[in-house]
Image (spheres, rainbow, N blue to C red):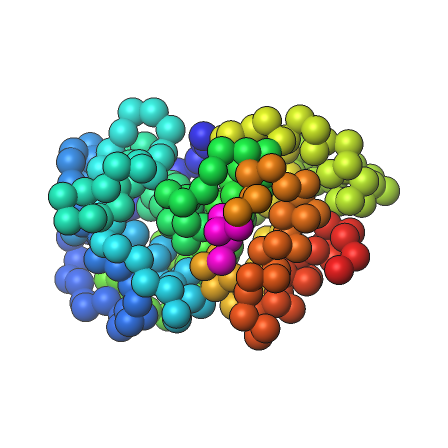
């Protein structure tokens, strides 16, 4: 589903004393790490994934998720529809070793699927947008972690890794494929590409390009993540035209959350 650059942990720093992590949001789900990660401990991976979850859950105070079991996989990262023995979400990541930026990128994507009620959705022509939101989530979290780890890293000696997340995000956003063609609006580009995107079920270069346009909006208005509580809950979401899909999502929201989706609609060039 995606490729990621890596930033290895310096072995010497792993030997230094550690301190307790910062206070978590009250609604952070428990993250249970299992399996062989080729050189990284369950505890260290858990700390990274908790940091990722915190960057999203702090903006979703009304959202509660079941606990999450995280295991390694050889293919693309995925959130399984099958739940764990106690109703846990099951997430599989392909990151290995101590490449924390890759773990963050992948887990933020899967966390967004959970927030988007992925297990309630119906297959249809708007699945590309969920993938777009999940890629936006990855980019957003990579933008939040540098300040979070600089101020209160999971361990005191991990503070020096904070800039790696920003560097990774910058490199992900650098390719020309992430940018709109010169003098082309998102609305014009979408009108040209939407017929193909309606058939896309996984992250593609097209949904990555849209995500790059949306991440500044989420950076500026992180409260927008809470609107995902209401996504994938419409009766006609699978078959609705994209403009109507966004409007249906907007109309389900509490009044105080609607301005964010209105900004999103405006970004796509849709009149309310």
Residue 58 is situated, as x and y percent measured from the top left of the image, at 39, 68
Residue 80 position by quadrant: top left
- The tally of labels here is 0
Q: Main secondary structure of the magenta part?
A: loop
Toward which corner of the image does residue 257 lie, by quadrant?
bottom right
Residue at 52 percent across and 43 percent down: it is 130
Q: Is residue 18 above or below residue 256?
A: above
The image position of residue 146, as x and y in percent, is 44, 60
* Residue 232 on the magenta span: yes
Which residue lies at the image location 76% right of the left edge and 53% below the top edge?
270
Give coordinates of residue 226: x percent, y percent: 48, 64
Range of residues picked out in magenta: 230-234
Picture residue at 24% right of the left edge, 62% below the top: 155
Residue 263 visible within the image: yes
Q: Would you say residue 139 is visible in this rendering? A: no
- Quick one: quadrant of the C terminus? bottom right
- Say left or right for 198 vs 2: right
Q: Is residue 79 magenta?
A: no
Compared with residue 5, is residue 12 higher up or lower down, i.e. above or below? Answer: below
Where is residue 84 shown, x and y percent of the image? Answer: 18, 42
Instruction: In this rendered view, identify the residue nearer to me: 130 or 206.
Output: 130
In the visual, does 55 lie left or right of 264? left
Q: Viewed as shown, does residue 71 lie left or right of 106? A: left
Q: Which residue is nearer to you in this view: 168 or 3?
A: 3
Residue drawn at x 61%, y 54% is 248
């Amino acid at each position: 589903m995606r490729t990621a650059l890596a930033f290895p942990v310096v072995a010497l720093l792993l030997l230094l004393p550690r301190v307790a992590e910062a206070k978590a949001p009250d609604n952070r789900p428990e993250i249970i790490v299992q399996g062989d990660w080729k050189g990284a401990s369950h505890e260290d991976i858990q700390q990274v994934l908790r940091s990722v979850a915190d960057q999203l859950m702090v903006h979703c105070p009304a959202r509660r998720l079941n606990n999450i079991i995280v295991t390694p996989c050889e293919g693309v990262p995925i959130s399984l529809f099958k739940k764990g023995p106690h109703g846990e979400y099951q997430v599989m990541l392909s990151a290995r070793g101590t490449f924390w930026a890759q773990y963050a990128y992948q887990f933020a994507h899967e966390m967004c699927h959970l927030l988007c009620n992925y297990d309630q959705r119906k297959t249809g022509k708007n699945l590309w947008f969920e993938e777009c939101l999940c890629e936006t989530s990855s980019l957003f979290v990579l933008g939040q972690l540098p300040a979070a780890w600089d101020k209160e890293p999971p361990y005191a000696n991990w503070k020096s890794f904070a800039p790696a997340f920003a560097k990774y995000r910058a490199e992900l956003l650098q390719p020309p494929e992430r940018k709109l063609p010169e003098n082309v609006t998102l609305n014009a580009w979408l009108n040209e590409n939407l017929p193909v995107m309606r058939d896309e079920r996984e992250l593609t270069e097209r949904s990555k390009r849209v995500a790059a346009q949306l991440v500044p909006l989420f950076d500026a208005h992180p409260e927008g993540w809470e609107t995902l509580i209401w996504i994938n809950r419409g009766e006609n979401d699978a078959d609705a035209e994209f403009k109507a899909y966004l409007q249906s999502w907007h109309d389900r929201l509490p009044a105080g959350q609607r301005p964010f989706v209105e900004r999103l609609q405006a970004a796509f060039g849709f009149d309310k």
